[in-house]
């Protein structure tokens, strides 16, 4: 039931229009950070207000929403966001990636490949990839405009000199459409390749930093790396999920409380549950035969 005292999708229409205009500009200039008037939301800044505002500005009555946080549909943050959107829109929510038309996520891109009918909204805490070595906003704007990225290349070079490898575990910078260097939200390296030529529109929102940027469908995305130190994502060779046996997905490393052995489990919980359900269905069908 929609709460009558609130607007559809919580935000007033003027706010939604302003956010959609910023979103359209972001789509037109892939990777460019578009400022917008970030609103106060009923969740704390830093907990997904940018993504939530994007979702609320885009959601329609026919949409089906999925929200994940750190790969899980059941986390407190994901459930709270789903409840807010559903209580002010009365739309359907789902945990199945294939059924969703609008997906809001923090830290992960789902394991199931996205389609042209879907929009992925990523929550972003720090949208400026150059901030590590340049604190002034005006200067970073000039550096982006002139494609003067020697600072970020030097930062990656120093990592290799000091540690023998690139040490950006998550949020590894990417080149968008051969022009802008972009922070791909704090997704793991494993997910960077999922942005390349993605069939779905990917929107990134930072509420605290008041920035929106986008990766339109079929946009080339390249993770920054050197020829002699190529980009390498997290390596799970020889490891598989203890529950469903998946071996080609991003895995969480856990410790079994009883045996104290290191075990691995799918980070994308809905993907893991769907695999388990399919395995059980096949097992039942084989018994019936």
Image (tube, rainbow, N blue to C red):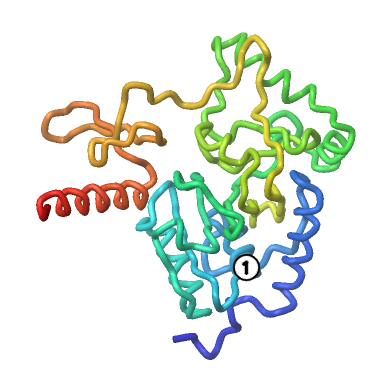
Quick check: 32 left or right of 114?
A: right
Say above or below: 117 vs 204.
below
Residue carrying label 1: 40
Say above or below: 214 vs 84.
above
Considering depth in this image, is 261 or 140 the residue closer to the camera?
261
Q: How many marks?
A: 1
Residue at screen point 14% across, 49% down: 286
Quick check: 58 left or right of 101?
A: right
Considering depth in this image, is 203 or 209 the residue closer to the camera?
203
Quick check: 78 left or right of 179?
A: left
In the picture, residue 118 is in which quadrant? Answer: bottom right
Residue at screen point 43% across, 65% down: 80
Residue 140 x %, y %: 81, 37
Residue 52 x %, y %: 57, 63
Residue at screen point 32% across, 46% down: 272
Q: Residues within 10 Å of mark 1 (few under 14, many from 20)?
A: few
Residue at screen point 85% across, 31% down: 147
């Amino acid at each position: 039931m929609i709460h009558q005292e609130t607007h559809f999708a919580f935000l007033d229409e003027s706010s939604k229009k302003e956010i959609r205009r910023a979103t359209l500009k972001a789509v037109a200039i892939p990777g460019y950070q578009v400022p917008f008037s970030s609103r106060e939301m009923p969740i704390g800044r830093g907990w997904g207000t940018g993504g939530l505002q994007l979702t609320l500005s885009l959601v329609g009555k026919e949409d089906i929403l999925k929200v994940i946080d750190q790969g899980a549909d059941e986390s407190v943050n994901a459930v709270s966001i789903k409840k807010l959107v559903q209580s002010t829109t009365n739309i359907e929510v789902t945990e199945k990636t294939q059924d969703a038309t609008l997906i809001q996520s923090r830290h992960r891109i789902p394991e199931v490949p996205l389609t042209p009918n879907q929009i992925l909204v990523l929550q972003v805490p720090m949208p400026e990839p150059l901030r590590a070595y340049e604190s002034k906003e005006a200067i970073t704007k000039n550096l982006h405009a002139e494609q003067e990225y020697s600072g970020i290349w030097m930062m990656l070079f120093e990592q290799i000199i000091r540690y023998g490898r690139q040490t950006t575990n998550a949020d590894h910078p990417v080149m968008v459409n051969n022009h802008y260097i972009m922070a791909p939200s704090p997704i793991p390296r494993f997910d960077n390749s999922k942005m390349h030529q993605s069939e779905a529109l990917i929107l990134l929102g930072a509420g605290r930093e008041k920035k929106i940027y986008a990766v339109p469908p079929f946009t080339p995305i390249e993770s920054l790396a050197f020829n002699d130190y190529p980009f390498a994502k997290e390596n799970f060779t020889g490891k598989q999920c203890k529950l469903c046996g998946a071996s080609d997905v991003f895995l969480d490393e856990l410790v079994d409380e009883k045996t104290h052995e290191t075990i691995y489990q799918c980070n994308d919980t809905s993907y893991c549950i769907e695999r388990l359900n399919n395995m059980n269905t096949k097992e039942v069908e084989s018994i019936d035969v």
